[in-house]
Image: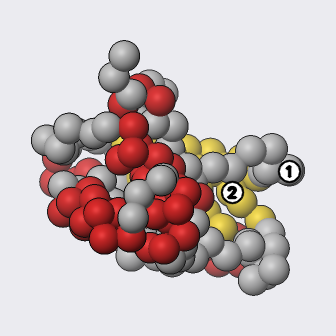
Amino acid sequence: MASLNLDKIDIEILKALQRDAGISNLELAEKVCLSPSPCSRRVKLLEEAGFVRGKVTLLDPKTVGLPVNVFMQITLTRQKKSLLEVFEKQISQWSEVMECYLMTGDFDYLIRVAVPDLLSYQVFLDKITEIEEINHIKSSFSLKQICYKTELPLQHLIQL
């Protein structure tokens, strides 16, 4: 965690920015009961301390033609550091890969892939199977998204 000591206003600023990164400084200042200038300074300090990783616009996957989510469990032949690095570098380059996690347990990686349809997934699968060190791939197709959040919980930052 960054070294900046957060108070309740900082946490409210972070919450508001997570909900709407495009909020104007004036609107943000009103939400957290500050004047615009101190609010702007706090936001800058939070960004410099590393609390803000970036600002994005979230698109609706269905509207942009990417309704299919596939979760892939991938096992490599060996967990040698150089092989992990090669896999991670390759998988990070493909735009279909939305998330990739190195895991403990029965498989090495869990990735989420967003594609327009099953044929597109087959094309992606053909591409990923060209990585020589992959031993096993298990794919699970999402039927329905129940919950999706980009806003991190921050209550643990509040000092009692």
Callout 2: 10 Å neighbours few (<14), some, many (20+)?
A: many
C-alpha separation, residue under disc 2 versus residue under disc 1: 9 Å
Q: Is residue 49 left or right of residue 72?
A: left
Q: Is residue 83 left or right of residue 160?
A: left
Residue furthest out toward the top: 160
Q: In the picture, which quadrant includes the C terminus?
A: top left
Residue furthest out toward the right: 143
Q: Quadrant of residue 2?
A: top left
Q: Position of residue 16 (x, y in %)?
A: 53, 56
Taking depth in this image into account, of 87 and 33 the one nearest to the observer is 33
Three-letter amino acid code at disc 1? Leu
Residue at position x 48%, y 74% in the image? 26
Q: Is residue 105 above or below residue 139?
A: above
Q: Position of residue 145 (x, y in %)?
A: 79, 50
SS label for mark 1: loop
Q: Position of residue 93 (x, y in %)?
A: 39, 76
Q: Position of residue 41 (x, y in %)?
A: 25, 66
SS label for mark 2: strand
Q: In the picture, which quadrant includes the N terminus?
A: top left
Determine if residue 2 is in view. yes
Taking depth in this image into account, of 18 and 32 the one nearest to the observer is 32
Callout 2 touching callout 1 (CB < 8 Å): no
Residue holding disc 1 = 143
Q: Is residue 38 above or below residue 4?
A: below
Residue at position x 39%, y 64% in the image? 35
Residue furthest out toward the bottom: 64
Residue holding disc 2 = 70
Taking depth in this image into account, of 118 and 129 the one nearest to the observer is 118
Q: Is residue 56 left or right of residue 146?
A: left
Marker count (numbered):
2
